[in-house]
Structures are given as structure tokens and as C-alpha cells.
Image: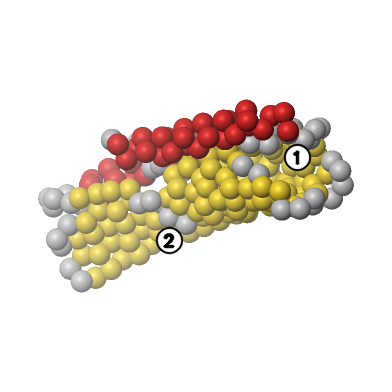
């Protein structure tokens, strides 16, 4: 239980620190404290899925995907709020090993997400043109559509359930702003994320247990993680 609350504690400490810094430097903050912008992104989930292992048999589902999309952001110097629309695809794989033999099946899959993100940041001015900043925050990925072989994903009960792939991400990384004019700037960010297991992965554990009967098999979800790179154009108010 403590492990589940540790990332939230880290975020709380980070945001408390940045808010305190903001209060100390509020009088010295530049006129362009607020800004907004739009841009594009690429990234994906390099992990995810579930597996089960026993003495004589093992079974694994993996669900990687990669793609890109567009995003909009609102910046308040020490925090960035973003909305993104993302589409990606990959090959979901099922592997079963039994008695020294292995069977593998792949299916073409696609996923469409709407993401809501909040990141804390602390900018450091390198010169008049360039500022760099570390990033730490959360991102909730709402799955709008998940397809396998161009058919909507169905859960273990046979119902359409693309939303079962929705998940909460914890992200960290860094970025930079490069001023093009007094008010217009380019923003580049790179974020690595780790997410909580989603409902679809919990169903995969149940499917493994149902398919491998008569054996004491131990199941677990696989870590979902991935890299996101964003490039946008912002305008200071």
C-alpha cells in the first residue's frame, strides 16, 4: 500500500516546493508569467500486459504501441496544464510455453486516447533566449477507441470496452523554451512515464487463470512505461 502512495507523496512535495518558490519570486516575475500554445507529439507505451507462470506452463500478453498526435497547453511559469489527442498502433502478442514448446500469436492493434496532463516545472534562464526546466507530474489517458484487427476491443465478458485501457501516468523529464520574438517561443519537452495497471490488464490476468486450469499459476500485470517527445509554439500574454 505504501508503494502506491509514494509517487503521490513525491508529487505533493514537488508542487509544494515550486509553489513556495513562486511566492518568494512573485514580485520579480517577468511580465510574461502566463502563456499558451499548441504543438505535436510522438510517443507510446513500450510495456504493458500481463503474465502467468507455473512450474510446467507460462502465458504472457504484451500490449506495446507507438504513434503521435497534437496537443495544447496553458503555462503559468511553474505549472503546465495540457490536453492532447493521440493515435497509435502496434502488435499485441500472446505467448504460451508448455512442455518445452512455445506458441505465439500476434494481432494488429490500434489505440486512440485523449490525455489530460498537469506538470510542475521550475525554469532556469540560460540566457536572454533560452530557458530550461525539469518536469514532474501526472497524465490521465482516456482511451476513446482500442481495436484489434480493426474491431473494437472486447473485454472478458464479450462487451465493447475500449475504456478499459484508460490509465493514470506518472511522468518526469525536462524541457526548454527558445524565444523567437518578445512573446513567441518554441517549446521542446521529453518525458518518461510509468503508469498504473489498467482494467484491461486485470482482465488479462483472469483470462490466463481461466485458460490454464488445474495448475497453481501466479499472475501479475506488466509495467506500462514509455517516452513522449513534444514540440510546440507558445505565446506569452
In-image side of 27 versus 51 (left or right): right
Among numbered discs 1 and 2, the one appearing first in the sequence: 1
As rendered, which of 121 and 74 lies closer to the eye? 121
Judged by depth in the image, the label closer to the viewer, 1 or 2, is: 1
> In the current view of this chain or complex, which residue is farthest to the right?
181
Colour scheme in use? secondary structure
Q: Are marks 1 and 2 in contact (CB under 8 Å)?
A: no
Task: Name which quarter of the figure residue 78 lies in.
Answer: top right
Residue at 80%, 50% (x, y): give it: 128
> In the current view of this chain or complex, which residue is farthest to the bottom?
100
Q: Where is residue 218 in the image (x, y as percent from the top left)?
A: 20, 50
Residue at 73%, 33% (x, y): give it: 28
Question: Does 24 appear above or below 154?
Answer: above
- Label 1 to label 2: alpha-carbon separation: 39 Å
Callout 2: few (<14), some (14-19), or many (20+) C-alpha neighbours within 10 Å? some
- Report which residue position mark 2 lands on: 106
Q: Where is residue 232 in the image (x, y as percent from the top left)?
A: 73, 48
- Look at the image and tell me in which quarter the C terminus lies: top right
- Report which residue position mark 1 lands on: 37
Amino acid at each position: 500500500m505504501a508503494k502506491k502512495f509514494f509517487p503521490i507523496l513525491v508529487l505533493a512535495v514537488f508542487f509544494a516546493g515550486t509553489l513556495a518558490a513562486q511566492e518568494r519570486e512573485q514580485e520579480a516575475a517577468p511580465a510574461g508569467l502566463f502563456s499558451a500554445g499548441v504543438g505535436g507529439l510522438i510517443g507510446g507505451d513500450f510495456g504493458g500486459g500481463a503474465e502467468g507462470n507455473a512450474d510446467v506452463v507460462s502465458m504472457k500478453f504484451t500490449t506495446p504501441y507507438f504513434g503521435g498526435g497534437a496537443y495544447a497547453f496553458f503555462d503559468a511559469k511553474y505549472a503546465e496544464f495540457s490536453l492532447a489527442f493521440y493515435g497509435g498502433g502496434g502488435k499485441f502478442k500472446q505467448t504460451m510455453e508448455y512442455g518445452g514448446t512455445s506458441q505465439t500469436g500476434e494481432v494488429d492493434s490500434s489505440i486512440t486516447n485523449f490525455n489530460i496532463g498537469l506538470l510542475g516545472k521550475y525554469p532556469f534562464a540560460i540566457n536572454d533566449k533560452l530557458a530550461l526546466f525539469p518536469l514532474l507530474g501526472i497524465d490521465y489517458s482516456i482511451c476513446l477507441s482500442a481495436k484489434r484487427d480493426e474491431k473494437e476491443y472486447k473485454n472478458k465478458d464479450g462487451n465493447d470496452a475500449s475504456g478499459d485501457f484508460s490509465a493514470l501516468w506518472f511522468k518526469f523529464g525536462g524541457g526548454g523554451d527558445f524565444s523567437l520574438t518578445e512573446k513567441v517561443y518554441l517549446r521542446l519537452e521529453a518525458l518518461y512515464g510509468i503508469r498504473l495497471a489498467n482494467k484491461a490488464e486485470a482482465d488479462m490476468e483472469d483470462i490466463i487463470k481461466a485458460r490454464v486450469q488445474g495448475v497453481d499459476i501466479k499472475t501479475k500485470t506488466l509495467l506500462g512505461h514509455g517516452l513522449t517527445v513534444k514540440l510546440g509554439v507558445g505565446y506569452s500574454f
